[in-house]
Image (cartoon, grey):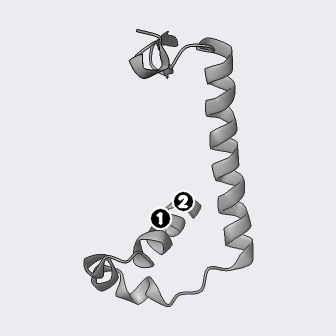
Amino acid sequence: PILIVLMLYLISSSSSSSARLHFSKYYHMPFPDKLRRTAANEVRAMFDLSFDSYMKYAFPHDELKPVTGSFTDSLPELGNA
């Protein structure tokens, strides 16, 4: 639920006029500090999980395949082709 509110806030504050029109009732809605901290903590936790999984299963390769838990070297500009 927190991330949905965060997404609505970010979309409504974008420069796109269609997003502003669609979410106009949320455009001037304040984003309380408690909600902001909660959303930031959730984003940090998701990043940490992703980073830790990459380090455990795929490092030093380019990408982690989350379904199989394997890795791929798909970025030839890094010299991994």
Label tally: 2
Dividing the picture into quadrants, the one containing residue 59 is top right
- Which image quadrant: the N terminus? bottom right
- In the picture, the disc for residue 7 is 1
Residue at 45% from the left image edge and 78% from the top image edge: 13
The relative height of residue 51 versus residue 64 in the rendered view (above or below) is below
Residue at 45% from the left image edge and 13% from the top image edge: 73
- Residue 75, percent from left and from top: 42, 20
Near mark 1 (Cα within 10 A), the count class, few <14, some 14-19 or many ≥20, is few
Q: CA distance from mark 1 to mark 2?
A: 6 Å
Amino acid marked by disc 1: Met
Residue at 49% from the left image edge and 21% from the top image edge: 63
Residue at 34% from the left image edge and 82% from the top image edge: 20
The relative height of residue 38 versus residue 72 in the rendered view (above or below) is below
- Residue 53, percent from left and from top: 64, 23
- The residue identified by callout 2 is 3
Dividing the picture into quadrants, the one containing residue 57 is top right
Question: Circles 1 and 2: CB distance less than 8 Å?
Answer: yes
- Residue 68, percent from left and from top: 46, 12
> For the view shown, which residue lies furthest in the left direction?
18
- Residue 79, percent from left and from top: 47, 13
As helix, strand or loop, the secondary structure at mark 1 comes to: helix
Amino acid marked by disc 2: Leu
- Residue in front for this viewpoint, 14 or 43: 14
- Which image quadrant: the C terminus? top left
- In the picture, the disc for residue 33 is none
As helix, strand or loop, the secondary structure at mark 2 comes to: helix
Near mark 2 (Cα within 10 A), the count class, few <14, some 14-19 or many ≥20, is some
The relative height of residue 28 versus residue 17 in the rendered view (above or below) is below
